[in-house]
Amino acid sequence: MTDTLQAEIVGSIHAIPASDWNACAGAGNPFIRHGFLAALEQSRAVAGETGWLPRHVLIRDGHGEIVAVAPMYVKSHSYGEYVFDWGWAETYARAGGRYYPKLQCAVPFTPATGPRLLSRHDDPAHRLALAETMVRLASQAGMSSLHITFPTEAEADLLESAGFIRRLGCQYHWENADYGCFDDFLGHLSSRKRKQVRKERQAVAAQGFHITTLVGADIKARHWDAFHRFYENVIDRKWGSAYLTRAFFDHLSGSEVADKVVLVWVEQDGQPVAAAFNMLGDDTLFGRNWGCAPGLQAPFLHFEACYYRAIDFAIAHKIKRVEAGAQGEHKVARGYLPNATHSAHWIKDEGLRRAVEKFVAHERALLAEDMTEQAELGPYKQST
């Protein structure tokens, strides 16, 4: 690249020493740690046959030290990304173009905001070097596009200034206003919403469920056996293709981020019936996956396990935020308010790029209006 910076592309996370990767990634976000990404590759959840071919980027300085890295994949489809570009692919195909393969800088199957351009010394020049390397690879390999999904806002600013198309999205997050207990949180809701939440929690309690929250070493193989069955049941019922293999959870449990796993565990009559899988960052609890036993009829259990128990955990451990995953306007009534997410896109074909820029600008205006309206009609008491 330059006399002082040299770029490399590697085909596995294991080609980069964990100590070097993690020195660039930092400790704040579990999904970008070497152990989490390695668990995806070791379990074959991420591989060429699943349409996620690893092509990670690293930057070395003049002394040969790895100073920046980025998780990157060659994609043959748009599944598992949560920033939807199917319409772009269809538009390009109708015009005679070939949208796939494309490059994706992301954490697979994980719609959680976090750093993507990982710099050991927090150097913007190193982050730009990563982005330039990815663009160069996409262009030289004849790929249609490069997509950096769920970066931080600062990274999105940097990428936009470098010529990437910036796209906004929306998720629903709960913020901890230094609550002492769940009732303190309820006290900030309007009377109607407060009654609704209490009614839902009471309905779950009346159904006789025993709910515990397991962290790190508390989670055993038997828990993962049951959870993966529950996860597959929900996926089969709703989408039809489970991304995460059972082996992924074993590798995760043996990794350096094992102590960041938080599992809300639900039993009824002594038998496991449901669970919610979360990961813990420095100041954020990230909701990831929900699963339940086939045929389970349990009104409001999903809300209790995924939303209310997450709030309980955050309050007890003084965690600033709960990010409850992708989509779901129903979360607003339960204290989770709309927050902007970001993605950045480089598109090789000028015609497609212009079409995407027009689409993204229109989408941004509609999204901003919708988010403002949702926040104004949210569950919290109106300030006077």
Image: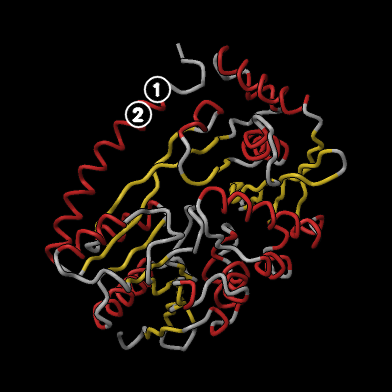
Label 1: state its secondary structure.
helix
Q: Is residue 219 visible?
A: yes
Of residue 283 and residue 302, the one placed in the foreground of this image is 302
Of residue 319 and residue 32, the one placed in the foreground of this image is 32
Q: Are marks 1 and 2 in contact (CB under 8 Å)?
A: yes
Amino acid identity at mark 1: Glu
Instruction: Quadrant for residue 334, please give it.
Output: top right
Q: Position of residue 162 (x, y in %)?
A: 24, 63
Tell me the residue that label 2 is attached to.
372
- Identify the image quadrant of the C terminus: top left
CA distance separating discs 1 and 2: 6 Å
Instruction: Quadrant for residue 345, please give it.
Output: bottom left
Q: Determine crowd level at label 2: few under 14, some 14-19, many 20+ residues with C-alpha closer than 10 A.
A: few
Q: Is residue 279 visible?
A: no
- Residue 360's place in the image compared with 241, above or below, is above
Q: Determine crowd level at label 1: few under 14, some 14-19, many 20+ residues with C-alpha closer than 10 A.
A: few
Tell me the residue that label 1 is attached to.
376
Number of residue marks: 2
Left or right: 372 in relation to 40: left
Residue at position x 35%, y 29% in the image? 372
